[in-house]
Image: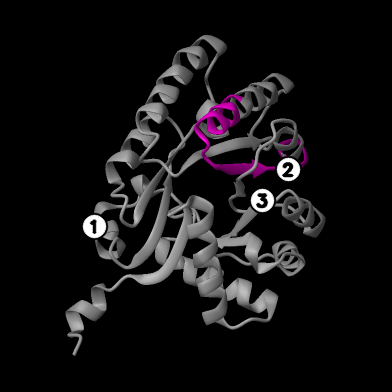
Amino acid sequence: MEDKKDKKNKKEKLADVHCHLDLIKRSELENIKDKVSIMITNGTNFESDIKNLELSNNSNIFPALGLDPEGLKGLNNEMLNNLLPKIDELIRRNKEKIVSIGEIGLDYRIAKSEAEKEMQRAVFEHFIILANELKKPISIHSRDAIDDVIKILYKKNVERAHFHYFEGDENHARKLAELGYFISVPPIESSKRKRAIKALDIKHIMTESDAPAIGKTPLDVKKAIEIIADAKEMSIEQVADEVFNNARKFFKL
């Protein structure tokens, strides 16, 4: 018979495809790290990339390394030209360990000028080229920029892409499915996202916590599963199985 301690510590069949474990309190992480089967922890700049590498164990915590648009704030071209080779080298050195390049993408809400948007696009394309070379999927941050993101992905012939905290409507969702891409659903409800979920086959959907920014910990993907189940009129158990298997296939775990 399974004793209470073993049952308490048993991993649940949950997949959090986008979180930031480097930003979660160590005490909180200790409480949950053995309770979730898949956690993809994403870097946002050079320092967080290193921290997430250190936290990963390639058992149930897997690293994604990148430079997100917020990580570009305050950088000029000279600073960026010094930073990119450092992140590239870190990614190349750990290419067997990482499961994705991310998070990377576009965020026009924080861009204050066309020049800042252009810098974001250049960096996004830079990491797409690297991901294509290393045959890694990409994990995308897209805010108020989804049409440009899709154009760039199409131009660069990206085969495996995942849109974290999906911001698009049902038409965007259908377009992404046509291209073979995935979205992940956070543990927060939105009528727009619900319509997008309805428009998608479950095989294109994954779950995330975006902890600690949205969810508190990766365990909050349970709420994301409930949101998907409600939108798709499926059982929670069926959704949990489907999205878990989607995560395993997408990240080749």
Q: Is residue 31 above or below residue 64?
A: below
Instruction: Choose the circle earlier in sequence order: 3 or 1.
Output: 1
Distance, label 2 to label 3, CA atoms, is 13 Å
Residue under the image location 82 percent in, 55 percent down: 171
Whether residue 183 is visible: yes
Task: Report which quarter residue 204 is drawn in.
Answer: bottom right
From the image, which quarter does the N terminus lie in?
Answer: bottom left
Frontmost of labels 3 and 1 is 3
Q: What residue type is labelled 2?
A: Ile
- Identify the colour scheme used: one colour
Q: Name the residue under label 1.
A: 27
Q: Distance from label 1 to label 2 (Cα)?
A: 36 Å
Name the element at disc 3. loop
- In the picture of the structure, the residue carrying the numbered disc 2 is 146
Q: Which amino acid does label 1 sit on?
A: Ser
Q: Residue furthest right?
A: 171
For residue 120, above or below residue 197: above
Give how far apart the Cα atoms at labels 3 and 1 are: 35 Å
Q: Name the residue under label 3.
A: 181
Mark sitting earlier along the chain (2/3): 2
- Mark 1: give few (<14), some (14-19) or many (20+) Cα within 10 Å: few
Residue 115 falls left or right of residue 224: right
Residue 104: percent from left, percent from top: 56, 36
Q: Give the range drawn in magenta.
A: 126-149
Whether residues under marks 2 and 3 lie with C-beta atoms below 8 angstroms apart, the answer is: no
Q: Where is residue 7 in the image (x, y as percent from the top left)?
A: 25, 80
Sequence-wise, the earlier of marks 1 and 2 is: 1
- The residue at the point 59 percent across, 31 percent down is 128
User: Is mark 1 in CB contact (under 8 Å) with mark 2?
Assistant: no
Q: Is residue 95 left or right of residue 128?
A: left
Position in image of residue 183 (x %, y %): 63, 55
Tell which of 10 and 219 is nearer to you. 10
